[in-house]
Image (cartoon, rainbow, N blue to C red):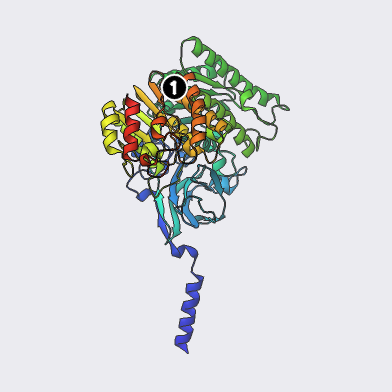
Amino acid sequence: MLNLKITSLFMLCLFLLPANAQLKWFNPMNTDYPVIQNQGWTKEIGNSYARLPQRAKSEVREPLWNLSRNSAGLAIHFYSNANNITIRYKVEGSYSMPHMPNTGVSGIDLYAIDSDGNLKLASGSYKWGDTISFNYKIDAKDKYHNLGFEYRLYLPTYTSVKWLEIGIPENADFEFIPLREELPIVAYGTSITQGACATRPGMAWTNIVSRSLDLPVINLGFSGNGKLEKEVINYINELDAQLYILDCLPNLPGYKEEDVFKKVVDAVKQIRSKHNTPILLTEHAGYSNAGLDTTRLRDYTIPNKASRKAYERLLADGVKDLWYLSNDELNFSMDSWVDYVHPSDLGMQFYADAYNKKIREILKMSKGNLTTTCPVTQRREPGNYEWLKRHREILQMNKANPPKAVVFGNSIMHFWGGEPKGPRSTGKDSWEAYMEPLGFRNFGYGWDRIENVLWRVYHGELDGYKADRILIKIGTNNFGVNSDKEILAGLDFLYTAIRQRQPEATVTVLGILPRRGMEKRVASINKEISKLAKKQGFIYKNVNKDLLLSNGQINESLFGDGLHPNAEGYKIIGKKITE
């Protein structure tokens, strides 16, 4: 009888075991490569969720140093096909503040990205205790494969993460994504930049901007302590960036106009002494009660007036690539604040919208209303190759050995040959005979559409070197989802982006190769592609006539599947390109 009771009690305990007993756990600090995104000084900071290196402790003020331990803006990217994701972690600091809930101060946020580059917010249950935990149930499946989604995990804005683990079921897959290779945007500011008063980390404006532009944004916002101090700018100057943002005016009320003027001028000149990178000066968004309180009105209009004067003086002095974001452009509404100064989620969105518009102008990252004009990543065949891994490899190769010639394309180019190597090389001999002597590097990606190539151009694949030749062949994968008009609009966007980044290169467009059952559509749209290419000053080459039969159908003997050329087909294309 006693044995029966013991057995029953044991079975009951097994039944009541928490779900996380069946999970396997992954710690970002135990990887062989850095995975903490949006963090400067990664190698120096090491195994920590901090924002300034240890040596800064003796060089910056103590309150600022303490705030630099907060994980504002930091993120972790990973792949998983798990149907349940649990994140547990421990923080140092208060879980909430009077004007911010737990979810905003010490909570986390999880976003998924599907294979077409679409963002989706994950929402789940959470609990606070000595260990905080968030649990997400994932029912959706990717339409292309069963290898899951890419995830972006945003860390708390106002507490210091001591440790963190991600748990998934034993039968699921998981992989951390390495640190992004692109140069970041560096934002130096106040509590507003740090994240007050977003109701969750994903709504802090730096994180919204990071998602919208798909760029790393290093958050150097320090609550009450963003004062354009030279000690902080000395550290900022150690970071190579695409853009430096100075958004410190909300911490300068009560300063005399001449003092704010001098701080802005000195800060810009300090950065310019080290970098020619664009600098963006941002005005104070104002106070919610400024219409009823003349002191509040004065407290933000005086710094803004001084900042504008500093901007104009710097331009007059010949400072180049200096930009300005005004109070009018921030365009806060009456309900954009939580209290007198800190933005609500609505205010954070106003901030992000204004920044996105300005940054796209500065970095030449235009975005349209059609899918073909909206740059996105893709992950349609991770069982064949990892798209982001290939992008990372290309950036590393370009930095180590700048190319003289590059070819942009989809799987038709990807599977031809050359470096970096793809999962297969159908036309290796012809690549070596025709393309390799011209120094071509292969920027073809399987299953790419126009918008994916646009993303790659915006994210560094043409930066940091001067190309002699650029070859473009993209668009066939848009046939099933876009009209010819949409395809042509996307190509026009893409051609402009390429010319902006490589103004001296000779650019050749091949148009869309013939494909089984779509020969007439291909011929029709290629006539328009030819006009677009010539409008941009590009060379258009017609390789299709040598791949067709006399009746206008594709020559099946030159294709493996009615779309991808075989070795003989690649040989013909190589001859036409180089003749």
Tell me: 364 left or right of 27. Answer: right
Q: Nearer the viewer, residue 444 or 43?
A: 444
Residue of label 1: 499
Q: Is residue 145 visible?
A: yes
Circle count: 1
| Coordinates of residue 324 in the picture (x, y in percent) | 54, 21
Tell me: 177 left or right of 304. Answer: left
Q: Which residue is depicted at the point 49% across and 55% down?
A: 85
Name which residue type carries label 1.
Arg
Outermost residue to the right: 292
| Coordinates of residue 413 in the picture (x, y in percent) | 37, 36
Q: Which residue is depicted at the point 51% across and 38% down?
A: 479
On the image, which quarter does residue 436 sit in?
top left
Outermost residue to the front: 550
Which secondary structure, mark 1? helix
Mark 1 crowd level (few <14, some 14–19, many ≥20, 10 Å Cα): some
Tell me: 324 left or right of 379. Answer: right
| Coordinates of residue 571 in the picture (x, y in percent) | 31, 34
| Coordinates of residue 157 in the picture (x, y in percent) | 52, 42
Q: Assign the C terminus to one quadrant of the image.
A: top left
Q: Nearer the viewer, residue 166 or 497?
A: 497
Q: Which residue is depicted at the point 50% across and 9% down?
A: 316
Q: Is residue 177 above or below residue 86?
A: above
Q: Nearer the viewer, residue 440 or 500?
A: 440
Q: Is residue 562 above or below residue 81?
A: above
Q: Is residue 190 visible?
A: no
Outermost residue to the top: 316
Q: Is residue 222 above or below residue 504?
A: below
